[in-house]
Amino acid sequence: MITRWSDIDRMFEAMGLLRGRLDSMYDDFDRSFGSDPGWRLTGNYPRTNMFDKGDYLELTAEIPGIAKNDLNIKIQGNYLEISGTRSASVPEGYSVHRRERGSTSFTRSFSLPADIDANKVTATLTDGILTLSLPKAEAAKPRQITIN
Amino acid sequence: MESKNLQTKEKGAVGTPRKVQSVMPLVDIFENDDEILLHAEMPGVTKDAVKINIDNGNLSLFGMRKAGRDGAPSWEEFGDVEFQRAFAVPQNIDVAKVKAELKDGILCLHLPKSESAKPKTIEISGS
Protein backbone atom coordinates (compact mmCIF):
# COMPACT_ATOMS: atom_id res chain seq x y z
CA MET A 1 0.00 0.00 0.00
CA ILE A 2 1.22 3.40 -0.90
CA THR A 3 1.29 5.67 2.05
CA ARG A 4 2.90 8.86 0.91
CA TRP A 5 2.85 10.91 -2.26
CA SER A 6 6.59 11.30 -2.10
CA ASP A 7 6.94 7.58 -2.72
CA ILE A 8 4.99 7.90 -5.93
CA ASP A 9 7.11 10.84 -6.97
CA ARG A 10 10.21 8.85 -6.39
CA MET A 11 8.88 6.02 -8.47
CA PHE A 12 8.24 8.30 -11.44
CA GLU A 13 11.68 9.79 -11.05
CA ALA A 14 13.21 6.36 -11.42
CA MET A 15 11.18 5.76 -14.55
CA GLY A 16 12.37 9.04 -16.02
CA LEU A 17 15.93 8.05 -15.34
CA LEU A 18 15.45 4.75 -17.11
CA ARG A 19 13.91 6.48 -20.10
CA GLY A 20 16.90 8.82 -20.31
CA ARG A 21 19.25 5.85 -20.37
CA LEU A 22 17.27 4.18 -23.12
CA ASP A 23 17.22 7.36 -25.19
CA SER A 24 20.98 7.72 -25.09
CA MET A 25 21.34 4.07 -25.99
CA TYR A 26 19.16 4.50 -29.06
CA ASP A 27 21.22 7.55 -30.03
CA ASP A 28 24.39 5.51 -29.95
CA PHE A 29 22.74 2.86 -32.04
CA ASP A 30 21.64 5.35 -34.68
CA ARG A 31 25.07 6.88 -34.71
CA SER A 32 26.74 3.66 -35.67
CA PHE A 33 24.98 3.87 -39.01
CA GLY A 34 26.29 7.38 -39.46
CA SER A 35 27.56 7.59 -42.99
CA ASP A 36 25.95 4.61 -44.59
CA PRO A 37 23.80 6.10 -47.31
CA GLY A 38 22.18 2.78 -48.19
CA TRP A 39 18.90 3.46 -46.46
CA ARG A 40 19.08 7.19 -46.12
CA LEU A 41 17.25 9.85 -48.01
CA THR A 42 19.45 11.15 -50.76
CA GLY A 43 18.24 14.68 -50.08
CA ASN A 44 21.22 15.59 -48.02
CA TYR A 45 24.02 14.08 -49.99
CA PRO A 46 26.74 15.22 -49.77
CA ARG A 47 26.79 16.14 -46.12
CA THR A 48 28.01 19.63 -45.48
CA ASN A 49 29.10 21.92 -42.69
CA MET A 50 28.73 25.68 -42.84
CA PHE A 51 30.62 28.09 -40.63
CA ASP A 52 30.34 31.83 -40.48
CA LYS A 53 33.80 33.29 -40.08
CA GLY A 54 32.92 36.94 -40.02
CA ASP A 55 34.15 38.19 -43.39
CA TYR A 56 33.44 34.97 -45.16
CA LEU A 57 31.44 31.77 -44.97
CA GLU A 58 33.13 28.42 -45.14
CA LEU A 59 31.32 25.42 -46.50
CA THR A 60 32.82 21.94 -46.34
CA ALA A 61 31.36 18.89 -48.03
CA GLU A 62 32.21 15.19 -47.85
CA ILE A 63 32.71 13.95 -51.38
CA PRO A 64 35.07 10.99 -51.35
CA GLY A 65 36.31 9.67 -54.66
CA ILE A 66 35.08 12.50 -56.82
CA ALA A 67 37.65 14.19 -59.01
CA LYS A 68 37.96 17.93 -59.47
CA ASN A 69 36.71 17.73 -63.02
CA ASP A 70 33.51 15.94 -62.08
CA LEU A 71 32.37 18.72 -59.79
CA ASN A 72 30.32 21.76 -60.63
CA ILE A 73 29.82 24.74 -58.37
CA LYS A 74 27.40 27.51 -59.20
CA ILE A 75 26.82 30.70 -57.26
CA GLN A 76 24.35 33.45 -57.78
CA GLY A 77 23.74 36.01 -55.07
CA ASN A 78 23.08 33.89 -52.02
CA TYR A 79 22.22 30.76 -53.97
CA LEU A 80 24.82 28.02 -54.14
CA GLU A 81 24.59 24.78 -56.06
CA ILE A 82 27.01 21.88 -55.94
CA SER A 83 26.64 19.03 -58.37
CA GLY A 84 28.82 16.15 -59.38
CA THR A 85 29.03 12.63 -60.66
CA ARG A 86 31.03 9.58 -59.83
CA SER A 87 31.18 6.70 -62.22
CA ALA A 88 31.67 3.34 -60.62
CA SER A 89 34.04 1.69 -63.02
CA VAL A 90 35.63 -1.61 -62.16
CA PRO A 91 39.42 -1.50 -62.51
CA GLU A 92 40.65 -3.23 -65.64
CA GLY A 93 40.97 -6.98 -65.33
CA TYR A 94 39.39 -7.30 -61.90
CA SER A 95 36.27 -9.17 -60.90
CA VAL A 96 33.91 -7.73 -58.35
CA HIS A 97 33.53 -9.22 -54.89
CA ARG A 98 31.62 -6.54 -53.12
CA ARG A 99 30.14 -3.21 -54.12
CA GLU A 100 28.94 -0.72 -51.62
CA ARG A 101 29.98 2.49 -53.30
CA GLY A 102 27.85 2.77 -56.36
CA SER A 103 27.96 5.39 -59.04
CA THR A 104 26.25 8.54 -57.97
CA SER A 105 25.21 11.80 -59.42
CA PHE A 106 24.05 14.46 -57.04
CA THR A 107 22.92 18.03 -56.88
CA ARG A 108 22.52 19.97 -53.73
CA SER A 109 21.57 23.60 -53.43
CA PHE A 110 21.70 25.99 -50.53
CA SER A 111 20.40 29.38 -49.63
CA LEU A 112 23.35 31.03 -47.99
CA PRO A 113 22.81 33.19 -44.93
CA ALA A 114 24.44 36.16 -46.69
CA ASP A 115 25.08 37.52 -50.16
CA ILE A 116 28.36 36.36 -51.65
CA ASP A 117 30.97 38.09 -53.75
CA ALA A 118 31.05 35.40 -56.43
CA ASN A 119 34.30 36.63 -57.98
CA LYS A 120 36.32 35.96 -54.85
CA VAL A 121 35.08 32.48 -54.07
CA THR A 122 37.78 29.85 -53.77
CA ALA A 123 37.35 26.11 -53.74
CA THR A 124 39.80 23.42 -52.73
CA LEU A 125 39.50 19.67 -52.73
CA THR A 126 41.69 17.71 -50.32
CA ASP A 127 41.31 14.13 -49.15
CA GLY A 128 37.74 13.94 -50.36
CA ILE A 129 36.62 17.10 -48.57
CA LEU A 130 35.55 20.08 -50.65
CA THR A 131 36.16 23.40 -48.94
CA LEU A 132 34.49 26.50 -50.31
CA SER A 133 35.46 29.86 -48.98
CA LEU A 134 32.70 32.33 -49.73
CA PRO A 135 33.56 35.97 -49.04
CA LYS A 136 30.52 37.99 -48.09
CA ALA A 137 29.45 40.85 -50.31
CA GLU A 138 30.45 44.27 -49.00
CA ALA A 139 26.92 45.03 -47.82
CA ALA A 140 26.64 41.78 -45.88
CA LYS A 141 29.88 42.09 -43.93
CA PRO A 142 29.75 42.68 -40.23
CA ARG A 143 30.54 46.24 -39.28
CA GLN A 144 31.68 47.83 -36.08
CA ILE A 145 29.56 50.79 -35.09
CA THR A 146 31.29 53.34 -32.95
CA ILE A 147 29.21 55.46 -30.61
CA ASN A 148 29.89 59.17 -30.84
CA MET B 1 40.36 42.54 -38.38
CA GLU B 2 38.08 43.88 -35.70
CA SER B 3 35.18 42.45 -37.63
CA LYS B 4 36.16 39.03 -36.32
CA ASN B 5 34.77 39.94 -32.94
CA LEU B 6 31.39 40.41 -34.43
CA GLN B 7 30.65 36.87 -35.38
CA THR B 8 27.81 35.48 -33.41
CA LYS B 9 28.26 32.33 -31.45
CA GLU B 10 25.20 30.21 -31.20
CA LYS B 11 24.04 28.49 -28.10
CA GLY B 12 25.92 25.33 -27.36
CA ALA B 13 28.56 26.08 -29.95
CA VAL B 14 31.24 26.77 -27.38
CA GLY B 15 32.91 24.08 -25.43
CA THR B 16 30.32 21.37 -25.89
CA PRO B 17 32.14 18.09 -25.58
CA ARG B 18 31.34 15.92 -28.55
CA LYS B 19 31.57 12.22 -28.88
CA VAL B 20 33.62 10.93 -31.75
CA GLN B 21 31.24 8.85 -33.73
CA SER B 22 32.32 5.54 -35.07
CA VAL B 23 31.43 4.85 -38.65
CA MET B 24 31.81 1.90 -40.94
CA PRO B 25 33.42 3.03 -44.19
CA LEU B 26 31.84 1.80 -47.40
CA VAL B 27 34.05 -0.52 -49.40
CA ASP B 28 34.44 -2.02 -52.83
CA ILE B 29 36.37 -5.25 -53.11
CA PHE B 30 37.84 -6.49 -56.37
CA GLU B 31 40.00 -9.44 -57.21
CA ASN B 32 42.20 -10.58 -60.04
CA ASP B 33 44.71 -13.36 -60.41
CA ASP B 34 47.44 -11.50 -58.58
CA GLU B 35 45.75 -9.60 -55.81
CA ILE B 36 42.70 -8.50 -53.91
CA LEU B 37 41.99 -4.79 -54.19
CA LEU B 38 39.99 -2.96 -51.58
CA HIS B 39 38.67 0.59 -51.82
CA ALA B 40 37.35 2.21 -48.65
CA GLU B 41 35.70 5.59 -48.41
CA MET B 42 37.31 7.74 -45.76
CA PRO B 43 36.68 11.38 -46.60
CA GLY B 44 38.86 13.85 -44.74
CA VAL B 45 41.28 11.32 -43.32
CA THR B 46 44.94 12.20 -43.74
CA LYS B 47 47.68 9.70 -44.40
CA ASP B 48 48.99 9.81 -40.84
CA ALA B 49 45.59 9.14 -39.36
CA VAL B 50 45.13 5.77 -41.04
CA LYS B 51 46.03 2.52 -39.38
CA ILE B 52 45.91 -0.81 -41.12
CA ASN B 53 46.46 -4.02 -39.21
CA ILE B 54 46.67 -7.50 -40.54
CA ASP B 55 46.85 -10.10 -37.87
CA ASN B 56 46.16 -13.76 -38.14
CA GLY B 57 43.77 -13.51 -41.06
CA ASN B 58 42.02 -10.41 -39.74
CA LEU B 59 42.35 -7.13 -41.52
CA SER B 60 41.28 -4.06 -39.62
CA LEU B 61 41.12 -0.51 -40.87
CA PHE B 62 41.09 2.58 -38.69
CA GLY B 63 40.97 6.18 -39.72
CA MET B 64 40.47 9.30 -37.64
CA ARG B 65 38.96 12.38 -39.16
CA LYS B 66 38.87 15.74 -37.44
CA ALA B 67 36.45 18.24 -38.89
CA GLY B 68 37.65 21.78 -38.38
CA ARG B 69 35.09 23.82 -36.51
CA ASP B 70 36.05 27.39 -35.84
CA GLY B 71 33.62 30.19 -36.48
CA ALA B 72 29.92 30.26 -35.83
CA PRO B 73 28.20 27.18 -37.21
CA SER B 74 25.23 27.80 -39.48
CA TRP B 75 24.68 24.09 -39.79
CA GLU B 76 26.72 20.98 -39.11
CA GLU B 77 26.02 17.63 -40.68
CA PHE B 78 29.30 15.88 -40.05
CA GLY B 79 31.88 16.04 -37.32
CA ASP B 80 34.80 14.11 -35.97
CA VAL B 81 34.61 10.55 -37.06
CA GLU B 82 36.46 7.34 -36.44
CA PHE B 83 36.23 5.05 -39.43
CA GLN B 84 36.50 1.44 -38.42
CA ARG B 85 36.00 -1.81 -40.20
CA ALA B 86 37.33 -5.33 -40.03
CA PHE B 87 37.52 -8.10 -42.60
CA ALA B 88 38.66 -11.66 -42.72
CA VAL B 89 41.37 -12.14 -45.30
CA PRO B 90 42.29 -15.47 -46.81
CA GLN B 91 45.48 -17.03 -45.52
CA ASN B 92 47.11 -16.88 -48.91
CA ILE B 93 47.72 -13.14 -48.77
CA ASP B 94 51.35 -12.12 -48.77
CA VAL B 95 51.25 -9.78 -45.81
CA ALA B 96 54.74 -8.42 -46.38
CA LYS B 97 53.79 -7.05 -49.77
CA VAL B 98 50.54 -5.30 -48.90
CA LYS B 99 50.46 -1.77 -50.26
CA ALA B 100 48.13 1.09 -49.45
CA GLU B 101 47.53 4.49 -50.93
CA LEU B 102 45.16 7.31 -50.14
CA LYS B 103 43.61 9.43 -52.85
CA ASP B 104 40.66 11.82 -52.76
CA GLY B 105 39.44 10.34 -49.51
CA ILE B 106 39.56 6.79 -50.81
CA LEU B 107 41.90 4.27 -49.25
CA CYS B 108 43.21 1.76 -51.83
CA LEU B 109 44.59 -1.40 -50.38
CA HIS B 110 46.43 -3.90 -52.54
CA LEU B 111 46.59 -7.35 -51.03
CA PRO B 112 48.83 -9.49 -53.24
CA LYS B 113 48.35 -13.23 -53.23
CA SER B 114 51.30 -15.35 -52.38
CA GLU B 115 52.93 -17.24 -55.23
CA SER B 116 51.47 -20.58 -54.26
CA ALA B 117 47.94 -19.22 -54.37
CA LYS B 118 48.07 -17.88 -57.89
CA PRO B 119 46.30 -19.92 -60.49
CA LYS B 120 48.58 -21.95 -62.66
CA THR B 121 48.08 -23.57 -65.96
CA ILE B 122 49.54 -26.99 -66.11
CA GLU B 123 51.20 -27.93 -69.31
CA ILE B 124 50.64 -31.47 -70.40
CA SER B 125 53.97 -32.93 -71.26
CA GLY B 126 54.31 -34.75 -74.51
CA SER B 127 53.85 -38.48 -74.56
Image (cartoon, rainbow, N blue to C red):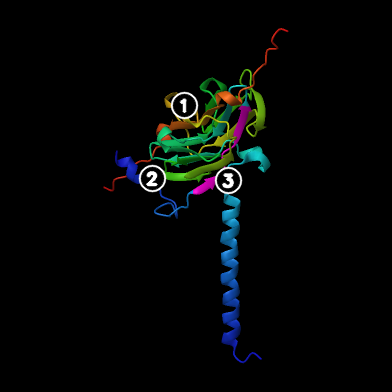
Q: Quadrant of the C terminus of chain B?
A: top right
Q: What's the CA distance linking mark 2 and mark 1?
A: 21 Å
Q: Position of residue B47 (x, y in %)?
A: 42, 33
The segment highlighted magenta reads B21-30
Residue A92 image point, x, y percent: 62, 18
Q: Residue furthest right?
A: B127
Query: What secondary structure is found at the residue carrying circle 2?
Result: loop
In the picture of the structure, the residue carrying the numbered disc 1 is A118
Specify whether residue B79 is in view.
Answer: no
Above or below residue A42? Residue B36 is above
What residue is shown with label 3?
A34
Residue at the top extreme of this rendering: B126
Question: Percent position (x, y) of residue B9?
Answer: 41, 50
Marks 1, 3 in one chain: yes
Provide the secondary structure element on which disc 3 rests.
Answer: loop
Image point 64% across, 90% down: which residue? A2
| Mark 2 residue type | Gln
The main secondary structure of the magenta stretch is strand
Q: Residue at x 48, y 49 (%)?
A: B20
Residue placed farthest to the left in the image?
A: A148
Callout 3 environment at 10 Å: few (<14), some (14 to 19), or many (20+)?
A: some
Q: Which residue is mark 2?
A: B7
Q: Residues within 10 Å of mark 2 (few under 14, many from 20)?
A: some
Subunit under mark 3:
A
Q: Chain of mark 1?
A: A
- Element under label 1? helix
Q: Amino acid at mark 1?
A: Ala
Q: Alpha-carbon neighbours of circle 1 within 10 Å: few (<14), some, or many (≥20)?
A: some
Q: Image quadrant for the N terminus of chain B?
A: top left
Circles 2 and 1 on the same subunit: no
Task: Identify the subunit bearing mark 2.
Answer: B
Which-is-in-front pick, marks 3 and 2?
Answer: 3
